[in-house]
Amino acid sequence: MNSMKIAIAGASGRMGRMLIEAVHNADDATLAGALDVAGTSGIGTDAAAFLGKPAGVPIESDLAKGLANAEFLIDFTRPEGTLTHLEYCAAHGIKMIIGTTGFDEAGKAAIAAAAQKTAIVFAPNMSVGVNVTMKLLEMAAKSFSHGYDIEIIEAHHRHKVDAPSGTAIKMGEVIADALGRDLKDVAVYAREGVTGERDPSSIGFATIRGGDIVGDHTVLFAGIGERIEITHKSASRVTYAHGSLRAARFLQDRKTGLYDMQDVLGLR
């Protein structure tokens, strides 16, 4: 099988560097491009220089230059940047692995439309462990559909700009779907003052931000006389990078279509 030619968006950032290192260490992948925002200090430098093993791939702000040799783009940036990349990739048949979070409904619709022109894996969390956890939550929600209050608690580093996390929201969607509910109707994102008794159909969210927490997620099913907690904790972003490469492998034989990590892992 030919080596996958992969470009990385946000190449100067922490996640970008983790992705570059994962591509560098993979036997079946080659770093074919690197993107970052114009004005970023890394523009023009070798994307793999930080590894002490230059790849001969400069970090570019121009999409045509940065993606000229790429078959795949892995993007963990911001919604506005990802949507710009999406338009270019759809027009040029470049497959995308999107781990960016914080999209509004219009952004999600744009991704779905682009998937008619190129193949995309779109997931708020690329970790294999997190996505197995999603399957466990679906199973648990069906068993705890009556008499259990559901709360989702997530913690991330101080630099994360969206809340709740995309992973927490996805967990809520998985649980709500399993219960035949719409998360938009039952989600409670904040509590303060006299709130009244808890609506038993609601799904609550609590957000913690601090330090260098990579990502912790706990779903609490609280019943009378017992409570069940399903928790996933990330110690390193490397799990997201490895999951992204697994997603790229999944897309190799696909030309179009919108997929998520449940598809990649065969958990449907």
Image (cartoon, helix red, strand yellow):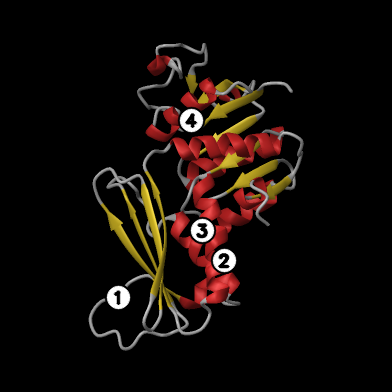
Q: Earlier in the sequence, mark 2 or mark 4?
A: 4
For residue 124, say whether it is visible: no
Q: Position of residue 144 (x, y in %)?
A: 51, 77
Whether residue 119 sits left or right of residue 163 in the image: it is: right
Hey, which quadrant is residue 176 in on the image?
bottom right
Task: Check disc 4: other Cα within 10 Å, few if <14, some if 14-19, many if 20+.
Answer: many
Crowding at mark 3 (Cα within 10 Å: few <14, some 14-19, many 20+): few
Q: Say whether disc 3 or disc 4 marks the residue closer to the N-terminus.
A: 4
Identify residue for label 2.
Answer: 138
- For the N terminus, the quadrant is top right
Residue 191: numbered disc: 1
What's the CA distance linking mark 3 and mark 4? 25 Å
- Residue 104 is marked as 3
Q: Residue at x 41, y 85 (%)?
A: 199
The residue at which mark 4 appears reads as: 19
- Mark 2, residues whose alpha carbon is within 10 Å: few (<14), some, or many (≥20)? some
Point 49% across, 66% down: residue: 172
Res 77 visible: yes
- Cα separation, mark 2 vs mark 4, equals 29 Å
Distance between mark 2 and mark 1 Cα atoms:
25 Å
Amino acid type at image mark 2: Glu
Instruction: Identify the mark nearer the N-term, 1 or 4.
Output: 4
